[in-house]
Image (cartoon, grey):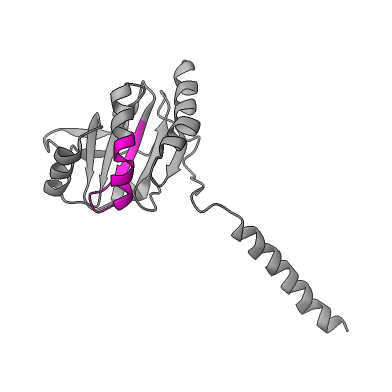
Amino acid sequence: MVRYLIPLGVFIVLAAFLYRGLSLDPKEVPSPLIGKPAPAFQLSELEDVSVTIGNKDLLGKVSLLNVWATWCVSCRAEHEVLMRLAESGEVDIYGLNYKDGRPEALRWLKMFGNPYVANAFDADGRVGIDWGVYGTPETFLIDQNGIVRYKHVGPISEEALSSVLLPKIRELKSQRG
């Protein structure tokens, strides 16, 4: 009798794990960076290869780092939201152009507008890997001290902006580093 109970017990445990896994939101990908300093990087700017941008440029103010690419359909979907956020002056937005071509990215920004203070050009995706990027778009909220405080996976919608990102941005800005 016991030999039948063991497989039944294993089946019940596996079913419980499966049930729990299916109830998780796939957009809520935990990031090991939350609460830690932003990964160090130094890349050429998309617009001017003689200028570099790095994690030190994110210090001293609350900022967003938005990972995007021209081949990313979802990036196009969130772009209008980023444009409005940039126009509001609420937060500085930095771009990380991920696994893209420089001419294509420049053409894309010229066509749709440029919400970024500066854009780092990550042609081979190595910096994206350091940031734990699974795909595009992904957006990181970084505090005044360069600590990653939040990661948003997928396109930023108006709802996500107003209900999650803006409250977090305002809370961080109200704190003095």
Q: Is residue 22 above or below residue 61?
A: below
Q: Is residue 101 left or right of residue 98?
A: left
Comparing 57 with 82, the one in front is 82
Q: Is residue 125 above or below residue 147?
A: below
Residue 85 sits in quarter: top left
Q: Position of residue 150 (x, y in %)?
A: 47, 36
Q: In the rendered image, which quarter contains the C terminus?
A: top left
Q: Position of residue 154 (x, y in %)?
A: 40, 47
Which residue lies at the image location 65% right of the left edge and 58% below the top edge?
20
> What stretch of residues is rendered in magenta?
64-81
Which residue lies at the image location 75% right of the left edge and 70% below the top edge?
12
Residue 164 visible in image: yes
Per the image, is 77 magenta?
yes
Residue 142 sits in quarter: top left
Q: In the rendered image, which quarter contains the N terminus?
A: bottom right
Q: Is residue 3 left or right of residue 84?
A: right
Comparing 86 with 126, the one in front is 86
Q: Is residue 82 above or below residue 167?
A: below
Q: Position of residue 86 (x, y in %)?
A: 30, 27
Residue 177 visible in image: no
Which residue lies at the image location 34% right of the left edge and 35% below the top edge?
81
Residue 67 sits in quarter: top left
Can you name the residue that lies furthest to the right here? 1
Per the image, is 135 magenta?
no
